[in-house]
Amino acid sequence: MLEVKNVCRNFKGLQALSDVSFTVEEGTIFGVIGPNGAGKSTLFNCITNYFPPSSGNVYFEGKEITGIKPHKITELGITRTFQHTQVFPQLTVYDNVVTGQYVIKQKDPGRTKTQFDEDVERILKLVGLDSYRETIASNLSMGDQTRLAIGIALATEAKLLLLDEPAAGMNPEETKQLMNLLRNVREQGVTIVLIEHDMKAVMGICERIVVLEYGQKIAEGTPEEIRQNPQVIKAYLGSGDIA
Ligand SMILES: Nc1ncnc2c1ncn2[C@@H]1O[C@H](COP(=O)(O)OP(=O)(O)OP(=O)(O)O)[C@@H](O)[C@H]1O
Ligand SMILES: [Mg+2]
């Protein structure tokens, strides 16, 4: 579904990504881990062309998307969330989800108001916010704001969801609930790429994981392979993150 091929990204003297390649299969949850500053968010920025790769290529469903404008990428079916949750703080939960539907209004102008309303209902239930529909988003807990951001992404009818540290700032119980939500989202046929610091969460939910360190891919494999990889253990040595 997604192929990242030899992607490099420099910032002046800094090589934030060096020759990173991997493939994400449709219907999977794919993890991206690595220490702070490893290049994880930069990778998402290059996939969605928030800024372009310095070199290398990105393919989505077999078509090259390198350098395509971010809104076009959303129309093709890739939606991302940012590391610092972005919802519309002054809008209600309901209206936040509606904002995601602008993409569909352009792609499928024939869809009726009833259908749009039903879609919002379905999404609110899926992300567990249907009883908060009239709540102003800024009054939600951090965890619920993240669920709402995922709801907005689902309203764009994304086929591929890129999530940048959605569990940041969550307690273990909220993280567990979030991982259950991600499993449910995947059941709806959405492929997920997940950047996450919570190692237990990543290991528990992802089929495959790539590990970045100083902009380079140092490992790729199943959670079990990653856990046993000497380079990964070294990268995380002393952090206590990998047990
Ligand atoms: N727009 C930018 N301009 C200059 N340098 C940048 C820019 N974005 C990222 N960098 C640098 O690139 C490197 C990788 O940053 P990136 O944000 O991708 O790391 P990360 O793996 O997401 O880290 P974290 O876990 O802290 O979120 C860092 O050294 C960072 O300072
Ligand atoms: Mg980051």
Image (cartoon, rainbow, N blue to C red):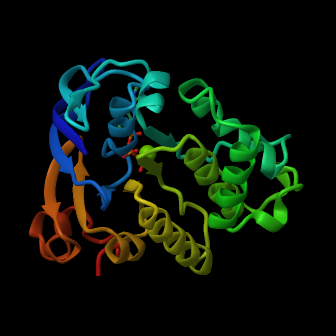
Q: Is residue 54 left or right of residue 147?
A: left
The one of 194 and 236 positioned closer to us in this rendering: 194
Against 239, residue 3 (above or below) is: above
Please determine whether, in this image, residue 195 is positioned above or below residue 75: below
Which image quadrant for residue 6? Answer: top left
- Name the residue at the left extreme: 230
User: Where residue 96 sits in the image (x, y, percent)?
Assistant: 74, 43
Q: Residue at x 35, y 76 (%)?
A: 240
Residue 62 makes an appearance in the image: yes
- Residue 97 seen anywhere in this rendered image of the structure: no
Query: Is 47 situated above or below 167?
Result: above
Residue 76, by quadrant, is: top left
Image quadrant holding the C terminus, namely bottom left
* Tag count: 0
Q: Nearer the viewer, residue 111 or 164?
A: 111
**Residue at position x 49%, y 71% in the image:** 179
Q: Quadrant of residue 178?
A: bottom right
Residue 158 vs residue 29, the one in the foreground: 158
Indicate the position of residue 67 as horizontal and vertical percent values.
32, 18
Ligand 2 is in which quadrant of the figure? top left
At 38% from the left edge and 25% from the top edge, which residue is drawn?
49
Residue 78 is left or right of residue 122, and the answer is: left
Residue 39: percent from left, percent from top: 32, 41
Residue 34, compared with residue 178, is above or below; it is above
Quadrant occupied by the N terminus:
top left
In the image shown, does 10 or 237 lie closer to the viewer? 10
Residue 204 percent coordinates (x, y): 36, 77
Q: Residue at x 25, y 38 (%)?
A: 61
On screen, residue 152 versus residue 195, left or right, reads right
